[in-house]
Image (cartoon, rainbow, N blue to C red):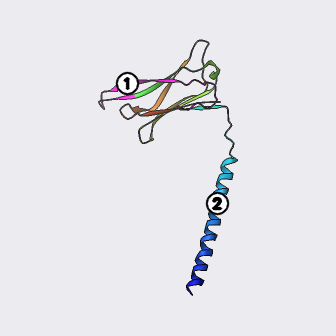
Amino acid sequence: MVTTMFRRSRRQAVFALALGIVGVGGVLASAASLNIANSTLGAGTTVIASCDTNGVSLVYTNTYVPSTGRYNTTAVTVNGLSNVCDAKRLDITLKQNTGAVLGSGSILSLSLPIGTTSATVAISPAANANLVRGAAVVVSG
């Protein structure tokens, strides 16, 4: 009786192991088939072959609000944009340390005359400047 139980539990363990191997193989196969070779997107701190390959810097515009006694971030200037990004879309999202979105803004079609490498994006709603801990910047189009 003990031998029969051992054989049954051993068969179940082998079956579970085989099922697990098939499941992991399926996940790896589907991950390997993803197409991530899109060359029209650049975002955040990691540059993905985009119109701007050397990154950008941000300058925040903060406005004091007497009724709340605090500063709000009302706009962000993106510096160091390549002229190759002209006519592309620019999106900025401000976030706090938890990742929650505080405010965002967009320029639907950048206008970067020769020699101009910056664009200012209005943020809505205005974000509590004390809570801003990061920004996501995306140039696409």
Q: Amino acid at mark 1?
A: Thr
Q: Quadrant of residue 22?
A: bottom right
Name above or below for residue 59 compared with residue 102: above
| Local crowd size for mark 1, using a 10 Å CA cut-off: few (<14), some (14–19), many (≥20) | some
Q: At x 58% / y 77%, what residue is drawn? A: 9
Name above or below for residue 76 compared with residue 17: above
Q: At x 64% / y 25%, what residue is drawn? A: 51
| Residue 37 marker | none
Name above or below for residue 37 compared with residue 16: above
| Residue 63 marker | 1
Of badges 2 and 1, nearer the viewer stands 2
Give the x, y percent position of residue 12: 61, 74
Dot 2 and dot 1 residues touching (CB under 8 Å): no
What segment is highlighted magenta in the picture? 44-72
In terms of depth relative to the viewer, which is nearer, 13 or 126?
A: 13
Q: Quadrant of the N terminus?
A: bottom right
Give the x, y percent position of residue 69: 29, 30
Give the residue number, with chain letter if any, for mark 2: 23
Q: Secondary structure at mark 2?
A: helix
In terms of depth relative to the viewer, which is nearer, 79 or 121?
A: 79
Q: Secondary structure at mark 1?
A: strand
The first of marks 2 and 1 along the sequence is 2
Q: Is residue 27 magenta?
A: no
Q: Is residue 46 magenta?
A: yes
Q: Residue furthest bottom?
A: 1
The residues tagged by marks 2 and 1 sit, at their Cα atoms, a distance apart of 54 Å
Q: Amino acid at mark 2?
A: Gly
Q: Residue furthest top?
A: 115
Give the x, y percent position of residue 94: 46, 34
| Local crowd size for mark 2, using a 10 Å CA cut-off: few (<14), some (14–19), many (≥20) | few
Q: Quadrant of the C terminus?
A: top right
Q: At x 64% / y 54%, what residue is drawn? A: 27
